[in-house]
Structure formats: C-alpha cells, structure tokens
Image (tube, coloured by chain):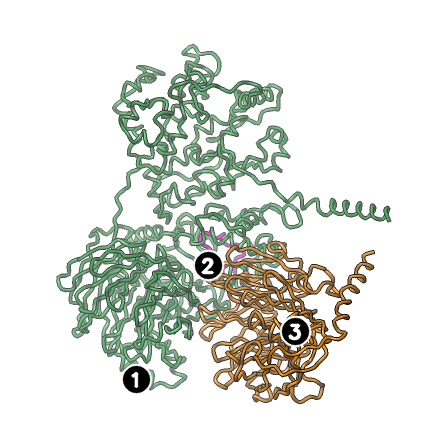
Chain colours: A green, B orange
Amino acid sequence: MKWYSTLRLLAIIILTLVTGWPLFGQIAQERIYVGEKACRTCHHLAGRRDQFNPWRLSKHAKAYAALSKPEAKQIAELSGVDVDPYKSPICLGCHTTAYNVEAWERDESFHFEDGVQCELCHGPGSAYMDAKVMLNRKKARQAGLKMPVERDCMVCHKEKGSHMAVLDVKKFNYKEGLEEIAHPGNGDLTKEFLFQVQRILSKWFPKNEPPVKPLPGPKYVGAQVCGKCHGQTSAGHQYSKWRYSKHAQAYAILNTERAAKIAREMGVSGTPQKSDKCLKCHTTGAGEPAGRFTDSFDPDQGVQCESCHGPGSEYMTESVMLDPVASVESGLRDVDKKSCVKCHTEGIHGHTLDFETMWPRIDHSKWQQKYSEVKYKSPFNLAVTKDGKRLFVACEASNSLIVVSTKTEKILAEVKIGTQPHFVYFSPDETRAYVSNRGSDNVSVIDTKTYRVLETITVGDEPHEMATNKEGTILYVANAGTYDVSVVDIEKGEEIKRLAASRGPWGMARSPDGRYIYVTNNLPRLGEFRTPPMSEVTVIETNRSIVKHRYTVPGANLIQGIDIAPSGKFALVTLIRTKNLVPMTRNIQGWIMTNGIGILWQDGRVDQLLLDEVNDFFADPTDVVFSKYGRYAFVSGGGVQEIAMIDIKKMKRILTNATEEKRNKVLPNHLSLSTEYILKRIKVGQSPRGMAVSPDNKYLYVADGLDDAISVIDIKKRARVNVIDLGGPKKITQARYGERIFHSAEYTFARQFSCHSCHPDGGVDGITYDIEPDGLGFNPVDNRTLRGVNDTAPFKWTGKNPTLRRQCGPRLAAFFTRIDPFTSEQSEALERYIVTIPRPPNRNQKSQGLTPAQRRGKRIFEREYDNSGNQMPQEKRCIYCHRPPYYTDRELADVGTASWLDTHATFDVPHLKNIYATAPYLHDGRAKSLEEIWTIYNPTDTHGQTNDLTKDQLNDLIEYLKIL
Amino acid sequence: MYRIFIILATFISLVPQAWCQSDTTVTLAGEPYVYTKWESFTRESTHGGLINDHIFWLEADGDSLWIGTEGGLVLYENGTWKSWTEKDGLPWNVVMGIAKDPKTGDLWLALFGEGIARFSGGYFEHFTQVNSGLLNDVVYGVDIQGDNVWVATTAGISRYNQVSGEWTVFNEKYAPMKEVWTYNVDAAEDKVYFAVWGGGILEWDVATESWKVYLDPDGQMEIDLYRDDGLVHDITTAASYIDGVLWAATYFGLSRYDGRNWRGYMDHDSGLPSNFINLVAGRSKNSAYNCTDKGLGVLVDYETDTWVAYQRDTEDAKTWTAHVMVGKQEIKTVPTNLHLPNHFTTSVEFMGDDVWIGTGHGLARGIGKGYYTGLRDKSPTFGVSRSSASQNNNFRKK
C-alpha cells in the first residue's frame, strides 16, 4: 500500500507541476507605482545613466502642473469636461501617472504632481525596480517593465481638437518628440556602474550608521509638503505655478552642456550638480548640515519654496500659516527683490535680473483666473400657480428656479438649486414646488412663499418629469438615466421604491381621477436587429404604486411630452416616427422622420397622427398640454419654433371615421391630414419646450429654451402676445448660436428634423440607422453619443471624418439635410456647441472605490494571460485597443463584426466612457446589451480573447466596463 | 474499521427505537385541522383554462393565484382562468418558479432553460445568461428580498439589484458551495435560504452580507447516522424560513432548525408520506407542508409531532384520504373529496385559510373553512400502541 500511496503522491505532484505551472505563472504579482524618486535611485547617476535630468527638464515633468493653467480650463470645456481639469480622470489620464488605479496601487513615495513620470510609459515599477531584476532585461519585462512604442505614445499625443483649438500646437511628430524627450542611458553593466548603484543604495539605506540627528531650529521640509496646502485646491495654485517655472528645473538644468560650459567658465571642476558653488543657487538649503532637513525634503527638486520663504518646519502648520504674526515669528520670510538678488546677481551667467519683468512671471498668487463664462438660463419647463399670478420656471443652464409675476413680468426670485433643473411641479396645496435636477439626481423641495429650498431628495439618475398622487403624499419621479420611476414618500422625504419603466422615462401626467400616472419613455425598447422602433408609455396605479399597464407605441421613438384629456378618456403624447430602415437620403419623401402625437385610449388602444405638412414638417414635438376644458391641445415644436394648436374634436372625428386598417396603417404616416385638426401653428421663440395653460384658460405660457424667455400666447387670438424676459445674457456666444442651430430644423429640407432629433440632449436615440445611399439596408450604423466626443476623433463608424466640422459639413447636407450646407460661420458655431456638450458623470463610480467584482473585472480588462496561463497576443487584450483615458486608441480595427450588409470590415474603436448608457452596441447596434457583444457576437475571439472566460468572469468584466 | 463503526453506530441508534416500540401507546394531544373539502382542477375539468396539468409553482396574490406550469403562466382570478404562453410574449413556457415583488407588484418568473422574466404591466422582460449577468439559464427558483431578485440556477446563485442594475454571482468561488446546483430559494426580510443539490442549505444574512452553510454532519449519502445532529442530507430540494425557523426539504427527509436545535423527519419515523420531498412550505414555526412523490405530508404541530398526510391510498382510488398521525403512528383516517389523479405533489401555497397544492396532474384548493392552527383542545382517546420512532416527550404515554 505504501509504495502505491507514494506513487500516487508523486503522480499528483508531477501532474500539478505539468498542468498547474502555467496557472501559477498567470498569477501576476500586484504591481505598485513607486514614483519617479524610486527610479531616480539608479537613474540619476553621473555618466550614461542619468535619465532623471532630461525628464525633469521635459514637458512630461510639468504635465500635471499644466492642468492648472487657464488654458487647461478652456481645453476642458471643449472636451466636454465640466470639472476642473486637475480633477478630471480624462485630463489626468495624459497629464499624470497612475490616475486610473486604486490608492493602494500607489506607493507613498508616488506623487501625482510629478506629472508624466517614468511609470506611465514603463509600467508600475514595484516588481522590476530591484536592481537584480532590472539588470536582467528579460526578468524585468516579465515583472512588468514596458518599453513603449509609437502607438503607446500616440494614445495621448494623437491630435485632439480641444488642444489644437486653444494651444494652436502643431501636429505631433513622433520622431521629433522622441528626440525631445530622449533619455538614453542603457549603458553597459559595467563594474563602475554597479559600484555607483551600490554607493547610492548604501547612501539611501546606510548600514550601521547612526541616523542623522535633527538640529534645533527650523528645518527644510521640501516643496511637496508646501504643495499639500498650496496645491490645486488653493486659489493660487502656487505649487503648480512653481513646478512650471525654471526654479523647479534649476537643479536638473545643471546637467546640461550649457551648464557644464558655464561651470567651467566659473572655474568649477567636475559636474555642476556636485558643485557647492552651483548648488548654492540651483537648489534649496545647499551647504546646510544634514540635521537641518526633514525626511520629506528632496534636494533634487531645485529652487523650492523654502529658498525664498525660509525653512518651513515651524510655520508649515495651518494654524501658524493663517496667523500673519505667528508665521513670521516662526520663520516665514516675506520675499522681495533682495531675496532674489542673492542669486540673481548682476551679470550672472550673462544676465541681469529685470525684477519688474520677472516678478510677475513667478507671481504665484493668482495664476488660474476663471475666464468669464456666459451663463444662460435655458428654461426647460414651467408651472403656473392656481391663481395665475406666478410662473415657476426650471432653468437648466443657470441651475436655478426663476419665479416670475405674470402681471408685472418681473422676476420675483431666482433660487439656486441642483444641477440642470428640468421640471417643476406643485404640491396639491401649492405650498411646495418640486424641481427635478437631472444633473445632480435629486429633487429640490421649495417653499412657494419664501422660495427657500427646504430639502433635497435623492432619486434615480437623471430625473425628469414628476407628479404626485391626488392626496399629495407620494411623488413620482421619472428617472431617464436608470430607466425607472422613483416613488417618494413626501412626508419622510425619501424614496421608498423604484418601479421599472421602459428606456429613458421622461414625461409624466396624472389622470384626472388620480388613479393613474402615465410615464413616457424617450428611447425605444431594445428590439431585434433591423426592426422599427417600438416605444412604451408606462402606467402606474397610484393606489398601490405598481405598474398597471404598458402601452406599446409601434414605429415611434422620442416620446416625451404627455397630458391627459380633462375627460380622462385618452392621453396625448408627443412622438417622432423614425424611418431608420431606409436610407436617410430619402428625406424628400418624408421617409426619415415624421413628427406627431400618440393618442392613448383607456381601453389600451393606441392611435398615431402626424403634425407635419408635406412641405413643412413639425420637427421635435416636445411637450403637450390641453386647454382647461380639453377643447384644444397645444404641442411645442422644439425644432420649428412653433406651437401647434389642435382641435380635439376634429382630431377625434378623423380617427373615429377611419376604418380599422386606416387607423392602424395609414393615419400614423399620413402627411396631408394635419391641416384638418391643427388650427394654427403659432410662432414663438427659440426651441420651445415646456408649456402651461393659465387657470383662466386665456393664456398659454411657453418656455423658449434658447431665448431665455417665456412666450405668452393668447389662446383666443391664437397668437403670441407677449414675451417675458428671464434675465439671461443678451450676448449670443458662438456656442449658444451653435446650440440654436443644433436644436433647429431650419437647416433641413422641409424642416423635417434637427440634430437634436437623433441626439436628444446630445446623447443617443437608441436607434440603428441606414445612412448611406448604397442600397436598402446596407451599412447600418448605430447612433453614437455626442457627449464629450471632441477628442475621440476620427468620427463615423468608418472613421472617415477626422473632425466634427467635416462630420457636419457639406456631406451632411448632401445626404441628410438635403438643403444648403451650413455656412462656415454656422459650421464653426455648431462645432463649438457640440464640443461643449458635457459628458455626464459616470453614476456607477462610487466614492468608496471599486467593488470586488469591478476589481476583478479590471484585471481581466488589463490581463496578459488567459485562463490557461498562456500569454495572450497583445491585440487580443481589451486594453490594447481600448486605452485609457478615453478607452480607445482612436484607430480602426477589424473585430470580426462585419456582416453581409457591411462594405467595410474595419470600424472605429469606440470610446468606452459611460458605455453603460449607450445601448445598443457594436457598429450596427445588433448587440442589445454589453453581454451580447461577447456571448453572441464574438464566437472566434476576434473581438478580444473572451471565450476562455467563465460567465462570472464576463460579469466581472462588464461590471468594470460600467464604471469607465 | 470505518465500516464496522457505521454498523455499530446504526445498531446503537436503532436500539432505543426498538425498545420504544415495545409497549408505548400514543393519543392525539389535540385535534389537527384536516382539509376535507377540496376543489380540484385539471386541464380537462377547466376545459383548457388550466393550460397544462404539470404544475411547478403556485404563488398567491391576494385572492388570486399565479400558477407556473410546464406549458405557460396561468392566473386564477375570481373563478376565471387566464394564461400566457410564448404566443403572448412569455419568453419560455416552462415556468418553474414565481415570485411577486411585494414592493413593485411585478412578477418574476423562473424559466427552466431560458433564464428569468419580469412580468410587469402585462409586458415580459427577459433576462438570460446571454443578454444579462444571469449566471445560467437553467433556473429552478426565484425570490425577492428588498430590491434584490435572487435566482437559483444550475450553475449557482445570481442576484440582480433592481435599483442599481448590478448582477452578482455566487458560485463555488464566492460562496461556501461544495456543489452549485441550486434547487430552490426562499427569501425573508433578514435571511435568504438556498437549497443546493448536494450542497446542503446556504444561508445569506442580509445585514452582514455573509454566507453560512448547513451540511449533513455525518456526511453519509445512504443513511442519516444521527437523526437530530443537523441537516438530514446534503441533497436538498427546498428551504422555507418562517418565524425564525428553517424547514429544509431533501430527497431523504425533512429537517427543522430553530437556530439552535435540529430535528430530522423521515418516512419511517414521521407522518411524511415519503422521504422524497419536492418542496416544503413552512406555515409557522410549528407547521410545514411537504410536497412528496406520494402525497402531501403536513406537520400540523411540531410540539406533539402531529401530522396529516393527504394521499391516494391505492392506484385506483378516486379520492384522496387524510391520515391523521402522531409520528409514524396513524391515529385515524378522514376521507376527502380531493380527486386529482396523481399525488406526486410539486407545489403548495397558502391563501388565507385555504391551501393550494400543485401536482403532476392538476392542482387543488383545500377550503379552510373553520381552519385553525395547531391542535384543537378536543382529544378523543385512541388506544393505539405507539410504534413510531418519535422521541417527543409531549406524547401522553399510557
């Protein structure tokens, strides 16, 4: 038995070694970013191994500091980044190192402030930094050392529209760039070199030497310590300003040939970086004894804060610094010309300091001044009080609620609330106004008398319209981002549950008897490939707050506005009927988009009628309201600057007189009927949106979104009789002009559609289009978001268009709009607006960091080995094409998804920012979910190697993708 | 050596039973409620209203009943039948489990082989392993806890958060599962239980978000060495948690766990018609309804080990008979009008005082007129020798 057992044990060991060995290999050691200082240990040696100095003198070392420059703010705005650049993951992705890793993956010695450091290009260094590993190139590579190639550099250096516009930089030339940052030093592994390493290591980690005894009195702490308080969060950005100055390079510059020449002229022998004479003015605290420095001090940082302000150990604490007397008593020195001339002596190195000129250059008290921003109001929706005296207007651009007197037209109050207020709704007793803030995912509760914000209730993502139950105890909120409805207990001020809507719940209305809440859905349901859109109106029963019914509205999308007839017998919704299955070139026949209303009957029946006329369409119907007794309905035409006044009696007659077949098949597409039930199309201001009828049924108020005004329509006269100014800026900026173009159908044949029709709020309509004039159904393409796309060029799925201007240029007119192309002025304005459409925050990112599943998913996204332990080819790894910070290499790739309908096999690698919000996926939208990209459409691992993944691993990967 | 130990232990465990059988007599401590009046429904008797006779799940919804069958979803409401099949948008006809979300009112369906579906406002939304984070399409059960939908699949457990949209996987990597084939899920406010085929019972603590596993301590597949030492067997089929008591069904008997003590039940020592239990539903901490392959075994009163077993006594029996028992000992039989042709019971559900059972051929509703819990204090004496293996001291020994 014994020999048998031994043999079995041996067999197990052998089997484990044979089959398990590769698996062991795939378990990569956790790699930590150690920061440039650790690299400097060996790479700042005299002779051929000095990479520190060239790096420190390069733009890479200043890349983070550059984010505090005023220009950075401008660039950020053109990139759809609406936070400070030094806080934006997108900006940080190319301006510093290791931004997209968790805190534990950065060593204490690592500092973002060091900008683009060694490890951005060469990979996190913890596993290869050991000299024994580094001296063996193969081992070092296995431990994560990367030697970047051109495509690695181009991830950041590829031309970006935003940077070109502001900095006027020339196109990046890889070879020239390489020369500029050249930091050669792969010298032979000589004994001399090893000796130097040993010497430095022994200096850093002395053996049996007593620690340096601190001397009494103030000590030098180093610029990094000052930067903790004087960094990006301070008004002056002093640290970045210093880092951007020559002072910060003063030490590194001693390594240049010019410095060596000057040194020789000054009688300095040897390298200037070792010369006390040079160091005296090229670094801080030179000549001081070791006990005069704290451990945090780094002499290689050049002329630091304490050169001028004195050693900081005694005044560095906030309490001392905030006390002018105490700080001076503790050693903080005021700086004037005298401080400078200690080093900047007359004629030094052939220069004499022109103090008056130089002083402003290093002034670090007011570097980043906010350039003036023009803030418009952009009213989106409004509500009128029961007495008809006040209008409450939700203003999206100014993040405010404006209250206006209808009589005096004066602004009674402007209340600052959340981000992007969208809708306003009164409690039944009208003591409260609820305002949904779609940018901050909450509802502001406002006292209608005092105009004070009483509380803020957190709801789902992107809340849009709201309604209460009849009693006013429950508030329903349509969350366009999470595709659900928040049910809020008003007394408790908290959400009690969520009800699943369809996709992009938008509008909301309560039935007159209070029994039901109707919710429109902006996006169609995810349907099968190349099928017409099917949209939904969700009905909630208020008694139990449950979903009671779901109307299906065939052939329609962008269902936004809704109102219910006072009789309660039917509801009207606004809709667009998009003909996405035929080439868009057919718009002359009205085959791209028709615009209309849906009529939802109590018995579940759905009718559709168009508001268009054959030669004059009614683009972008946005909101609908009934007159007090339901005789008329008004629909705002966001793209045509008009309000359609519908005679309900005539409208119903047309429906009831029609045969069943006609109602189902003919009327929804009939372009010649609208004049029979539309009494008048009333002109209003730019981009009309929400509306409200005065309680006396005399007036219709319309929010003119891009005019910062309210149009007042006399219902009897059927005409705009007044305009109430909401006090927005009168200056029309280029971006605002572009915004108006974007939302207007004036630039389309017969005013059929606007840019907004396919890109509501700059996002997507969730539809796959047949754009090209290449035959029916060929080259279908999924719609792509415009939010923050500027720097993700090229555009189009085929990557044909290098700029947005070209994307929206003459070709657009030839194939889409079929009208005169945009003038150059219009084209520039449109582009200017598009690039400023902000990218919404990723709502899946949580402050507490990654979940375990997301952490596992990140490893899969970045993995180098498959589940069998085999090294994967680079092009099979997710991160090869989907590179941060945008998670695209902005190249074309063939991932095997071309179908027989496609004439190209390669497609633009899409960026993955907020990818969770842009279903469907793949170039033709055939994947209804992220999962389907790999479970169905990657059978042979052409779209990354994924077929070795288990289902739970795929889930992990997707959980990670959702937070990008 | 090991075999000798098992034989010895078995012998020792049987000695007291044999001793007890010698001269003990038992009586009913009280009268259990017996469902004698039933309404029986088959596809034939309902003229197709019940679209399929193979009943997999019953879910009460007020006075209405949702029925999961092999041929679609059925709603019995106000005496009428309404059904949904693939023609009506139901993604897959085989409905193994149903859970009604108490918050949203939506219905969640376990579709055997085709994932799960949300039935809301008359519209089915389909989630599969291909289009979502669902672990596997072979789904046995589904239940709701808070905002989470818990799904028992053949490859482990999936959790879908309806608010965040996040899918979480629990399989052998992320839960203490020695097997992953999950047969059943039962969610309460504080705990969620899973019956894992070969993996015992898994307990998810909602507050601490942590797992605990219950396994058969003796690890034996053929016998249960010590009856009350823990779960009777690792091959579990269902769990039911009520009043702080866990009822666990296996193919080898029933277990009850009150958080401190275990109690095992088998057909040779209790009123269980069979050890082969498809489903257990606790009605209280003292009462559990067991769907077995040989009828419905109802433990009416835990304290007195009083059972009522409903079954067809013979192959050609027209109606079912209720057997009132104490432990294994039959005290009396009561005829019922339940006339389903098959007593392979698969599902059970309570609707007020009524009880519904599903079988391999139709379903039936026991009318609970005058229903009471536990035992009624009326105890006609039955002079019957005690022959069961019951060890309960509450029996009146004569």
What is the spatial separation of the Cα atoms under label 1 and label 2, in whole angstroms? 46 Å
Mark 2 closeness class: few <14, some 14–19, many ≥20 residues within 10 Å? few
Give A11 or A338, whichever is nearer the viewer. Answer: A11
Task: Give the residue pinned by disc 2.
Answer: B164
Type of amino acid at the residue the image marks with label 1:
Arg
What is the spatial separation of the Cα atoms under label 3 and label 2, in whole angstroms? 53 Å
Q: Which residues are magenta?
A: A902-922
Residue A915 falls inside the magenta stretch: yes
Furthest residue in direction front, as rendered? B398
The percent position of residue A58, horizontal first and vertical second, equals: 44, 30
> Looking at the image, which residue is at 41% across and 35% down?
A63
Looking at the image, residue B222 lies above or below residue A455: below
Q: Disc 3 vs disc 1: which is toward the camera?
A: 3
Q: Disc 1 vs disc 2: which is toward the camera?
A: 2
Dot 2 falls on a residue whose secondary structure is loop
Type of amino acid at the residue the image marks with label 3:
Phe
Residue A610 visible (yes or no): yes
Q: For the residues labelled 3 and 1, say whether their Cβ atoms are less than 8 Å apart.
A: no
Task: Give the residue pinned by disc 1.
Answer: A653
Mark 1 closeness class: few <14, some 14–19, many ≥20 residues within 10 Å? few
> Looking at the image, which residue is at 36% across and 35% down?
A231
Q: Image quadrant of residue A562? A: bottom left
The percent position of residue B374, horizontal first and vertical second, equals: 57, 76
The percent position of residue A9, horizontal first and vertical second, equals: 79, 46
* Chain to which mark 2 belongs: B
Give A494 or A73, whichever is nearer the viewer. Answer: A494
Dot 3 falls on a residue whose secondary structure is loop
Looking at the image, residue A243 lies above or below residue A496: above
